[in-house]
């Protein structure tokens, strides 16, 4: 099975400086945020697309929106359980001349105005996986601008290493399969994966991951990272930046 994944462009976690925080954050030209008419659940929700022209998504949870706005993984957003349950549809247009990299800051303004979001950031010691370059060096190279390939078998990825770390955090939560006729899905608590590769730019590659019965996704991916990509994964304790949701409204306002 070949799975194509094109992740949205992200910027480093909590990259905003004190000087930036004191300036007026940019906002979307027009934005609509409404509760989804039909909730689809965790196997299908959180479908997001962004571009230089705008940001849109269907059945997005507030936890995912906060993670997008602060450029972190879902387990780095701490708050009430309903953040994972309520789903929203969003369409927002970016003003002309505003860069795509400013979209996360626009989301922060949107969440504040439509959901009354109040939050704060802090660091907490957590178990994490560190994604690093292997001893023999990485076997992947930045994609040429405007050049998109179809890739080979397996999981096809297009994005930066921060986005790849996000993907791995989801993949690592897939348990071992005991029955070949019953598909397994990602579930349970996700352990954050931190990008420690130092690799810059946008990458495009395919990874042929073949889990076996009784073997969890982490073991299969660890082998594929080392053999095919020249990357490695390491478990460690680290101080991780988290976003604490102090309060938010379940029904957005101002459409």
Image (tube, rainbow, N blue to C red):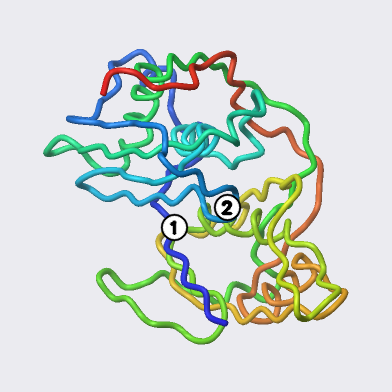
Which part of the image, by quadrant, shows the N terminus? bottom right
Q: Quadrant of residue 125?
A: top right
Q: Residue at x 50, y 43 (%)?
A: 39
Label 1 Cα neighbours within 10 Å, binned few <14 / some 14-19 / many ≥20: some
5 lies above or below 108: below
Expressed as whole percent of the image width and height from the top left, the position of residue 7 reads 44, 57
Q: Residue at x 76, y 38 (%)?
A: 238
- Residue 30 in the figure: left or right of residue 36: left
94 lies above or below 132: above
176 lies above or below 161: below
| Secondary element at tag 2 | helix
Label 2 Cα neighbours within 10 Å, binned few <14 / some 14-19 / many ≥20: some
CA gap between label 1 and label 2 equals 9 Å
Q: Earlier in the sequence, mark 1 or mark 2?
A: 1
Task: Please tell me the numbered disc located at residue 244.
Answer: none
Task: Please tell me the numbered disc located at residue 7.
Answer: 1
Expressed as whole percent of the image width and height from the top left, the position of residue 81 reads 67, 28
Task: Please tell me the numbered disc located at residue 166.
Answer: 2
Q: Residue at x 51, y 49 (%)?
A: 45
Q: Residue at x 25, y 31 (%)?
A: 31
Q: Is 8 or 11 nearer to us in this picture?
A: 8
- Residue 133 in the figure: left or right of residue 47: right
Extreme residue toward the front, this view: 38
Expressed as whole percent of the image width and height from the top left, the position of residue 79 reads 64, 24
Contact between marks 1 and 2 (CB within 8 A): the answer is yes
């Amino acid at each position: 099975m070949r799975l194509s994944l094109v992740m949205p462009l992200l910027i480093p976690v909590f990259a905003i400086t004190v000087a930036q925080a004191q300036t007026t954050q940019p906002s979307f030209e027009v934005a609509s945020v409404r509760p989804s008419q039909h909730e689809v659940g965790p196997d299908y929700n959180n479908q997001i697309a962004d571009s230089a022209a705008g940001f849109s998504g269907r059945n997005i949870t507030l936890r995912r929106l906060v993670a997008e706005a602060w450029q972190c993984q879902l387990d780095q957003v701490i708050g009430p359980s309903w953040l994972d349950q309520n789903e929203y549809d969003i369409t927002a247009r970016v003003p002309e001349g505003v860069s795509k990299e400013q979209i996360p800051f626009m989301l922060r303004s949107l969440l504040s105005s439509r959901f009354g979001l109040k939050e704060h950031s802090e660091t907490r010691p957590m178990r994490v996986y560190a994604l690093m370059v292997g001893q023999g060096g990485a076997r992947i190279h930045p994609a040429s601008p405007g050049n998109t390939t179809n890739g080979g078998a397996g999981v096809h990825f297009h994005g930066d290493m921060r986005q790849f770390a996000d993907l791995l955090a989801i993949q690592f939560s897939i348990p071992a399969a005991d029955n070949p006729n019953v598909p397994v899905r990602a579930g349970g608590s996700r352990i954050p994966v931190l990008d420690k590769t130092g690799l810059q730019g946008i990458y495009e590659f395919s990874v042929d991951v073949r889990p076996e019965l009784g073997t969890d996704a982490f073991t299969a991916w660890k082998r594929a990272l080392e053999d095919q990509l020249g990357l490695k994964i390491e478990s460690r304790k680290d101080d991780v930046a988290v976003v604490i949701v102090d309060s938010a409204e379940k029904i957005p306002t101002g459409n």
